Image (spheres, grey):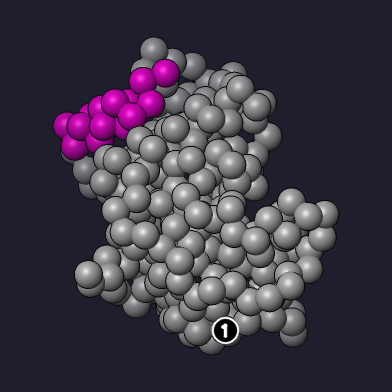
């Protein structure tokens, strides 16, 4: 069976701060129509990776492609117009503005000359995904719960119609009862036709909704798994459950099953 087309690719990417490389020759692909989770211990380079993908950090070497288009030289705004949505972990909504105003800004950032009807249709699609926001459109974003703010942040990224959504720790700071709700929302976004690449520390919940998992250790890709097999892998168990951040042996390069479910 042929490999699924890539929604997002990094090819031999090196990136870092100052004179030091945090990412060293990273090559990975996130398949279209799927949820791919990047896992790794603290200091693995996950934040550097997602900032490089979003355009906040320019790579020293390599290429970044969205739907086959080379976006390496594009700014964050240009990448957004190329179909790449991004939800940072912090400061991802304007708390002093209403929910409706946040959504309008998200839409006008990409579609500056859109008509009222176009905005209304885009907003309706977002509210179908996140119905809890609908009765609160005139309320301040700062009055929302942490989970509701994360949903609004995703809505602001989705309202422009991206093909790929980058999520940096979508469940960070949420109470345990809301973590599953948030990741269920990620799965719903994916079912709406958006490919997702996310960084997530809660790996049990992340693997419940993901299709694929990629392990990043020390700025290098150590392997790729089907999500259902990821937590059972001996290397992964040693890394995350064995009380050590040392990895005994290289991961097998590809352990993916086709046709995995998102839920």
Residue 81 shows in this picture: no
Assign the N terminus to one quadrant of the image: bottom left
| Relative to 161, residue 238 above or below | below
Residue shown at the point (79%, 63%) measured from the top left: 245
Instruction: Name the outermost residue toward the right.
Output: 243
Assign the C terminus to one quadrant of the image: top left
| For residue 196, side relative to residue 115 (left or right) | right
Residue 191 at what x, y percent from top left? Answer: 29, 40
Instruction: Name the outermost residue toward the top.
Output: 135
Residue shown at the point (41%, 44%) measured from the top left: 157
Would you say residue 185 sits in the magenta stretch?
A: no
Residue 181 shows in this picture: yes
Q: Which residue is mark 1?
A: 25
Q: Main secondary structure of the magenta part?
A: helix
- Quadrant housing residue 24: bottom right
Residue shown at the point (61%, 22%) measured from the top left: 177
| For residue 126, side relative to residue 139 (left or right) | left
| Relative to 259, residue 141 above or below | above
Region in magenta:
116-132
Residue shown at the point (20%, 32%) measured from the top left: 121
Q: What is the total number of numbered labels drawn onto the structure image?
A: 1
Residue placed most toward the observer, 221 or 103: 221
Q: Secondary structure at mark 1?
A: strand
Would you say residue 124 sits in the magenta stretch?
A: yes
């Amino acid at each position: 069976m042929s490999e699924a087309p890539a929604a997002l690719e990094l090819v031999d990417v090196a990136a870092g701060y100052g004179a030091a490389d945090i990412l060293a020759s990273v090559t990975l692909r996130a398949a279209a129509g799927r949820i791919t989770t990047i896992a790794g211990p603290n200091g693995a380079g996950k934040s550097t990776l997602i900032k490089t993908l979003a355009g906040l950090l320019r790579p020293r070497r390599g290429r970044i492609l969205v739907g086959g288009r080379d976006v390496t030289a594009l700014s964050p705004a240009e990448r957004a117009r190329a179909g790449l949505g991004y939800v940072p972990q912090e400061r991802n909504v304007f708390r002093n503005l209403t929910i409706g105003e946040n959504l309008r800004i998200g839409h006008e950032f990409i579609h500056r000359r859109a008509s009222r009807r176009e905005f209304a249709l885009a907003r309706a699609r977002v509210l179908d995904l996140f119905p809890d926001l609908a009765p609160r459109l005139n309320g301040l974003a700062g009055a929302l719960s942490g989970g509701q703010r994360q949903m609004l942040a995703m809505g602001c990224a989705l309202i422009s119609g991206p093909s790929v959504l980058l999520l940096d720790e979508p469940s960070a700071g949420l109470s345990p009862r809301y973590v599953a709700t948030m990741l269920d929302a990620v799965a719903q976004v994916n079912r709406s036709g958006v490919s997702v690449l996310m960084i997530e520390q809660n790996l049990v919940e992340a693997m419940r909704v993901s299709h694929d998992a990629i392990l990043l250790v020390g700025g290098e890709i150590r392997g790729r798994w089907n999500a259902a097999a990821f937590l059972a892998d001996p290397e992964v168990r040693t890394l995350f459950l064995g009380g050590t951040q040392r990895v005994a042996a290289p991961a097998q390069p590809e352990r993916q099953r086709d046709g995995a479910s998102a839920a």
